[in-house]
Amino acid sequence: MLFASPTPTRYDLRFSLAGIPIRVHPLFWLIALLFGASAGGVVQVLIWVAVVFVSILVHELGHAFAMRFYGQRSYIVLHGAGGLTVPEPAGLGGGWADVAPGPTQQILISLAGPGAGFLLAGLVLAAVAVAGGSVQLKSLFGVIPFPVASLPNGGILVNLLILTMLWVNIFWGLINLMPVYPLDGGNVARFALLKVDPWDGVRKSLWVSVITGVLLAIAGLTLLGSLYMALLFGFLAFQSFQLLQGRPGRGY
């Protein structure tokens, strides 16, 4: 399935931050390079790859720190489709909780990823403002308020770095909050519906995922002219529909 953790390879980059193990699969770099190929020259592409790496890592660390707050160990995998924070099974001892987080805690864990990205974007905006730069609020696609910042004396590459940081952390963060599996918004919808309907909440959240995914795919193609967005949400809607076909009407 898309967004599943890939099999480890000998070429994985491995390190840890704040005691959280992190593994970067080679496909992460390849896909980042392919998406950044249209950015311009070599330096511009490297800026894109660096921003994507830092931004996705910060996003996943948001999940990991939230899990740690609720007493759950985790590790992070960055792969070709983005990133994944994988909780370790409960009951491993070592002073950590022996029970998995409940629905409310799971919602907060899911929101912590996009929240970390929004915080990073806020820090970038604050740094630009402190440095005497310009921060303005413009309209994205004529609908979404979106901050734009620049440093008059920063040069092309610095301003490209600022713009890319804001784009990745805000726009991708908003996309991630859509109630579509397996995005964070899909997990929020799942656990919110489980709180209301423990027996049938998962099935209802899958239907929300299917309907929202189809609508976003249509909007991406017709309103935004984005074939990538149409294909992504179309695939995710189909994946949710497949899950619906294969599960009984139970909650967990």
Image: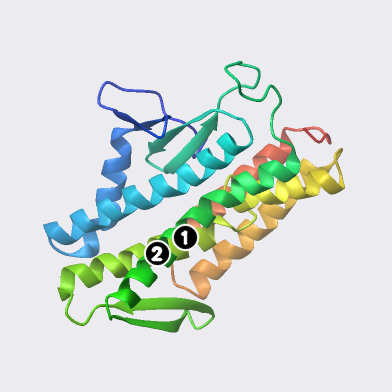
Task: Say left or right for 53 vs 77.
Answer: left
Name which quarter of the figure residue 82 lies in.
top left
| Residue type, numbered disc 1 | Leu
SS class of the residue under badge 2?
A: helix
- Percent position of residue 191, x then y: 73, 45
Q: Is residue 206 visible?
A: no
Task: Say left or right for 198 vs 107.
Answer: right
The colour scheme applied to this rendered structure is rainbow
SS class of the residue under badge 1?
A: helix
Q: Is residue 74 above or below residue 131?
A: above
Task: Say left or right for 30 vs 84.
Answer: left
Q: Residues within 10 Å of mark 2 (few under 14, many from 20)?
A: few
Question: How many marks overall?
Answer: 2
Residue drawn at point x = 17 percent, y = 68 percent: 157
Residue most toward the left?
42
Q: Residues within 10 Å of mark 1 (few under 14, many from 20)?
A: some
- Percent position of residue 46, x then y: 19, 54
Name which quarter of the figure residue 167 lies in.
bottom left
Image quadrant occupied by the C terminus? top right
Residue drawn at point x = 50 percent, y = 34 percent: 4
- Percent position of residue 130, x then y: 32, 75
In depth, the one of 201 and 249 nearer the eye is 201
The circle on residue 123 is 2
- Percent position of residue 5, x then y: 46, 31
In depth, the one of 231 and 169 nearer the eye is 169
Q: Are marks 2 and 1 in contact (CB under 8 Å)?
A: yes
Q: Is residue 79 visible?
A: yes
In depth, the one of 222 and 99 nearer the eye is 99
In depth, the one of 208 and 237 nearer the eye is 208
Q: Is residue 85 above or below residue 141?
A: above
Task: State the residue position of label 1.
Answer: 119
| Residue type, numbered disc 2 | Leu
